[in-house]
Amino acid sequence: MDSLIWIGAAISLAGVAGLGWCIWHVLKLRRLALDDSEMRKRMQKAVVINFAALAVSTLGLMLVVLGIF
């Protein structure tokens, strides 16, 4: 069960890295000062990746809890 904890922690860290990428990407977009329609188009990509990263992080945490039990 120790391996399940470490696998879950690695998956969770991958999700957190995805969240960090989203933050970096949005900050970069804000500096570009694009028009509204272009900004919305590019932000939609970041929102999709953000939700995917949250899901991956949640699954990793579930594995950690399962390994602890």
Image: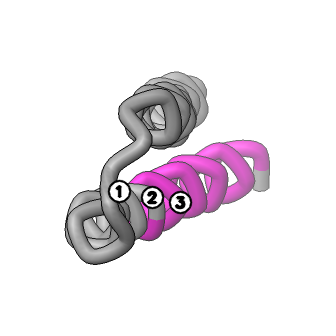
Q: Which residues are magenta?
A: 51-68
Q: Dot 3: few (<14), some (14–19), or many (≥20) neighbours within 10 Å?
A: some
* x, y percent for residue 12: 54, 38
- The secondary element bearing badge 1 is classed as helix
Please name the residue that numbered disc 3 is placed on.
54
User: Which numbered disc covers residue 31?
Assistant: none
Is the Cβ of the residue at disc 1 closer than 8 Å to that at disc 2? yes
Magenta span dominant secondary structure = helix
Q: Report, in whole angstroms, how far the alpha carbon at label 3 lies from the one at label 2.
A: 6 Å
Q: Is residue 15 left or right of residue 35?
A: right
* x, y percent for residue 24: 49, 26
Task: Assess whether residue 34 is covered by the magenta stretch.
Answer: no
What amino acid type should be assigned to the residue bearing mark 2?
Asn
Please name the residue that numbered disc 2 is placed on.
50
Is the Cβ of the residue at disc 3 closer than 8 Å to that at disc 2? yes
What amino acid type should be assigned to the residue bearing mark 1?
Ala
User: Which numbered disc covers residue 46?
Assistant: 1
